[in-house]
Amino acid sequence: MQTVTEIQALRAAVRGWKAGGQTVGLVPTMGNLHEGHYALLRLARERCDRVVASVFVNPTQFGPDEDFERYPRTLASDQAGLADHGCDLLFTPGVDLMYPYGPAQTVRVQVPQLTRVLEGAHRPGHFDGVATVVCKLLNLVQPDLAVFGQKDFQQVRVIERLVLDLGIPVRMLAAPIVREPDGLALSSRNQYLSADERRRAPGIHQTLLWMRDAMEAGGTPASVERSARKRLKGMGFQPDYAVVRRSADLSVPERGEREGLVALVAARLGDTRLIDNLQLD
């Protein structure tokens, strides 16, 4: 596996592959890789001749009181893991390369509507940072396929809208959530949890399963959401939201609507904020 830090080397490698008629997949990450990331890599590997992964902890998607400084950076182990899972090239740019005029002065990409609710409401500016860095990476790599994990369900919808609206010639693939045996969705932030918090953390997934069952039993979105928040609080979580939304655009479903829905939860457990979701049909 080749590791590059400069745009010229990245583009030279991709240009050479494409000149030989090979297809290229991209797996963008912030590093501290786990089995969830490697599942994305395997999907790209199955569908493309070559796979590029990026590791970049993007400062513009972190708020002022969030965990940018302590976000785990484990490049050496990430390199080893990517090499073991069939990655052809690792792109590890620095902040100066991605933001030559500085993060505060960068050109920003904004996706309306989808970014104003849920994560966007609780993390103002987060999706501007996500959309901007993804747009940059897609432009730099120019892949045929880009793979993202569905644990960040709203992020996937934002990027799909970005790609469609800007006419970016890339195929999007949303990969299923990878979970621990007890149901906890894999996340780099899980390592922040204490032993007791880790024991309680699967309560988010249990709540999502309960929300699915309650909707199937005829519950209304509003009543299911109220009960879900109460359940989470009873387990020691501080929920930001526990909602049922249309999966296509995250809008509020009509009473009696049952198809094309997703349940989404974001909640704090101690100092750690966890998110998860479950499609209901």
Image: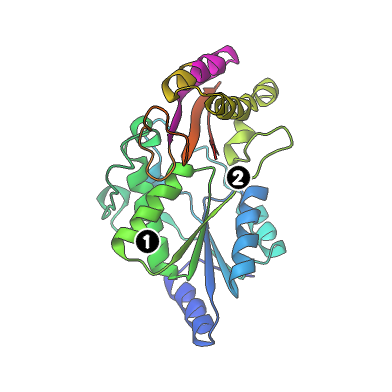
Provide residue 56's location: percent of width, then percent of height. 49, 54
Crowd class of label 2 (few under 14; some 14 to 19; many from 20; radius 10 Å): some
Between 94 and 156, the residue placed more toward the observer is: 156
Count of numbered tags: 2
Provide residue 108's location: percent of width, then percent of height. 27, 52
Is residue 271 among the parts visible in the rendering? no
Name the image colouring: rainbow
Residue at label 2? 177
Which quarter of the figure is the C terminus placed in? top right
Q: CA distance from mark 2 to mark 1?
A: 25 Å
Residue 228 painted magenta: yes
Query: Which stretch appears magenta?
Result: 227-245
Provide residue 13's location: percent of width, then percent of height. 52, 78
- Kind of element beneath mark 1: helix
Task: Please tell me which residue is depicted at 67% across the width and 40% down the height of the picture.
Answer: 179
**Left or right of 24 in this view: 185:** right
Vertical side of 162 occupied by 201: above or below: above
- Kind of element beneath mark 2: loop
**Left or right of 165 in this view: 235:** right
Vertical side of 104 occupied by 24: above or below: below
Between 238 and 216, the residue placed more toward the observer is: 216
**Left or right of 230 in this view: 165:** left
Point out the residue furthest to the bottom here: 20
Is residue 85 among the parts visible in the rendering? yes
Task: Please tell me which residue is depicted at 35% across the width and 66% down the height of the picture.
Answer: 168
Residue at label 1? 136
Which quarter of the figure is the N terminus placed in? bottom right
Residue 107 painted magenta: no
Of labels 2 and 1, earlier in sequence is 1
